[in-house]
Amino acid sequence: MAATSSSVRESRDSTVQSGDLVLLRIPNGDIKGVKVEKDTTVTIGRLGSFYANELIDQPYGLTYEMVDKRLKVVPPRTIQEVEDTDATNELINDGEFVQPLTIDEIQKLKVSGVHVSDIIKKQIEQHANYSLKTEYSKEKYKKRKEEKYSKSFTTIEPTLYNVCDYWFNKDKTRIRDIRADSLSQMLNLANIRPGGRYIAVDDASGLVVAGILDRMGGEGRLLTICDTDSPPPYPVTANMNFKPHVTSNVLVSLNWATAEEDYTPIIPPSDIPEDQIRSERQKSRLNKRKAVTDLLSNTRDELFYGEFDSLIVASEYDPWSILEKLSPYVAGSGSIVVHSPHIQILSDLQTQMRGASQYLCPNITESFLRRYQVLPGRTHPTMVTSGTGGFVLHAIKIYDDPNASKVIFDRRKPKKPKADQATEQHVTSGSDSPLKEDTSIENTADTIMLDVGSQKVQ
Amino acid sequence: MWSTAREIAAGDLVILWLTREALQPLVITPGKDFNSKFGHYRHADLVGIPYGSKVASRKGKGFIHVLRPTPELWTMALPHRTQILYLADIAFITSHLNIKPGSRVIEAGTGSGSFSHSVARTVGSAGHLWSYEFHEVRAGKAREEFARHGMNDIVTLTHRNVCREGFTVTDTVDSVFLDLPAPWEAVEHAKQALRKDRTTRICCFSPCMEQVLRTVNALNDAGFTEITMYETLLRPLDVSHVPVLTPIGEISEKLKQAERKREDKRLKQIAAGRQQSASKRKREDGTRMDDQSPEAAEDSTAVERKRIKTDEESAGVPLDVLPEPVQVMDLDGPEDFDAPVAPSGRSPVPVSTAKISVSKVMSEVRGHTSYLTFASLQPFSPPPPETESLTAAVTPADVES
Ligand SMILES: C[S@@+](CC[C@H](N)C(=O)[O-])C[C@H]1O[C@@H](n2cnc3c(N)ncnc32)[C@H](O)[C@@H]1O
């Protein structure tokens, strides 16, 4: 089967377009964001500059060399080349030093049955030779290599992963420590899909909003609640280069005041009788105002109608107060996902949620992520790794039945009906019950208790 | 894929949440019953109630939660035919491979379909998943499942050995996910299936490092670049709500009080003993009592008197108005030292009702799932001749050796 033509409405162009914000990786490993505007010259710091038109309509992911402001595509680097050029700490020059093991030699060693660890040892011996060389010659080598590559850059495709990674490395506090792996878990846990309806509170510069929009593909509703008068710009979304339909039909916003049911927003009148309108300008201003007013009231109606699929929170504000306000609008069986850089915030939140009847099994996880360098003979975890990508709390919204009572099993005496009867009487109530306190009790050897989140009637 | 209606209808697939560890899929079939140690339920009784309801057993104790299926719940409830992928890996792979609405994806093998359901949800009806499984029975079961879950327009399942026969599409997909014992054998086939007009990506999921190394070589030979490898895990945290931690001042008070009590007891015993022996001596006609030093006897009686007195004085001091230990330190004289202590027989430590939430990592966590090897294929056409050969030196020089 051949590739069917791209009938899919994609969330962004697969090539660089005029007006795009493009991320570039430069030879020293830094990532720069540049605006690519038709008929202009793009300058990458002191590295060089090029005509924007050279990049427009190019696919992402390629490496270019800048030659007289024009771009020359260079082939993607194989592992051998990566090895050679990423070597910035300790460098060895094939021409100046003892030639270390070549691939051929390694192959021969492998074929002759030499163990991998011995090959590595052999390489380290060569390495020791190298470390005896003068700093000066190392520096010289380094300069030469850097010069060779200094005029080049690679475009980075603005996938959600890459954009998140870029922000995480650049300024993680602005995205509230949400690392790409944590973000992906949040999106999966919140069951984000095209056509879904979601509420989000994003004080993470729009990273969460960008992720949700990316996974909605221009279908459904994302209602965000913000702390500003007018909708926030969500700067991370700019890096995604979304086509307009991804955002325009999907994203609407309220703020913490207009999201209150019993608050009546103060809106200047827009319904002025025709005969009182004096000018075209006034008319268009009134029309605009009317559109804003209508949008506000429709959005409020939509929120208050509820039945949203999930609520996703990455906020600087008290999460319990956010849940109290917004979880009534989440449908039964919907997901509640809260991210925080701080475990204390989520521990307290979980305790509070356990005392409320509408949350099933709130649980907290922290994601661990480890990256490995994969080079022949030297595959190992990278020395520097990100310590944390924050914590994620997940719970399922449920409709309680206060009359339901739990069963307590005692595995030690399962066969005695009388004992069973007795234990079944054990109905815990109230949040101070020791059994209730520790949800992990249901994992322990002796007791299985049903309904971790079950509740006293309030 | 699954019902989006508010209420449960006959024929719906629901997920029964029995406990955190026990989730079970159920197709609502009026006329049938669901009986378990968690109670007795009629399917018919579940029809018409909203998703997310807690439902009490018809008789006796017990209840269940009836949930709307999501790929995440399905992963926890599905019938295992193989080892499966879980949330952390699925989410990370989805993100790194840039799987989103409209994406075209290949996976092999299908296994138990845990990854398949998540991908199908994410790519939506505008995207497509080609899934391959060489085990006939598993392929059949997965095909049935996909059909039952309304995924036929999103997923195409093919029964074949992809290492030998490759994939059914060419220059089509955005990404390939390989969860097989020998992914390196499928790398060339994967390259053919990937589209060439943009960056495409591959992920190989292998539990062993040896597999990773072979895969990396195969990827490199096939012209994939940006080869990297990750490991991801979830650390679940256990939160408990516990009383605020006791300051050691309270403990020292307790100890001091115990000490005093012991001393009181000792002195009382001495006094009693003395009385006893005195009367005994009297009875036995002895008039002197010199088996104890007079000073010591006097001292202890003095202390005892004081203690008894202060105990009486402090009786009735309510527990919650006890001063802080630091205030105690300001006072001088051993007598006063007694003042803040609670009457004997009651706990000297004030019972604090304040509680705090504390969290720790659960004691047993998954230590390793698999290594995730990623690579990408760039839309670069003319392969320069030098990249074919591997004669370039493997220099030991690197960022980290
Ligand atoms: C670990 S399971 C996949 C689990 C799956 N990712 C999930 O999440 O449920 C691996 C599957 O690959 C299948 N398999 C192994 N080698 C294969 C091959 N060469 N072609 C097709 N399927 C293969 C096996 O039969 C098995 O069902």
Image: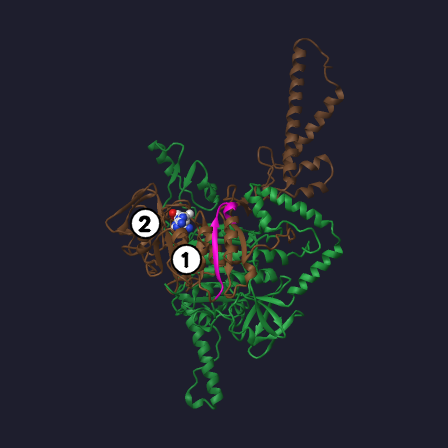
Chain colours: A green, B brown
| Residue position for label 2 | B141
Residue B251 sits in quarter: top right
Placement of A383 over or under B379, stated as above or below: above
**Which chain is indicated by disc 2?**
B
Is B204 within the magenta? yes
Query: At which x and y percent is residue A221?
Result: 42, 67
Looking at the image, residue A421 sits to the left or right of residue A41; the answer is left
Query: In whole angstroms, how far apart are the C-alphas of marks 1 and 2?
Result: 19 Å
Q: Residue furthest top?
A: B285
Tell me the magenta residue range: B198-212
- In the rendered image, residue A240, in percent from the top left (x then y), is placed at 51, 67
For marks 1 and 2, the one nearer the N-term is: 1
In magenta segment, residue A338: no
Task: Tell me the crowding category of disc 2: few under 14, some 14 to 19, or many 20 or more residues within 10 angstroms, Cα based.
Answer: some
Judge from the rendering whether residue B4 lies leftward or rightward of residue A129; answer left or right: left
Q: Amino acid at mark 1?
A: Ile
Residue at image position (52%, 41%) is B363
Q: Which residue is mark 1?
A: B106
Q: Residue at x 58, y 32 (%)?
A: B345
- For the residue labelled by badge 1, is the local secondary structure a helix, a strand or a loop? strand
Badge 1 vs badge 2, beta-carbon distance below 8 Å: no
Task: For the N terminus of chain A, give its image quadrant.
Answer: bottom left
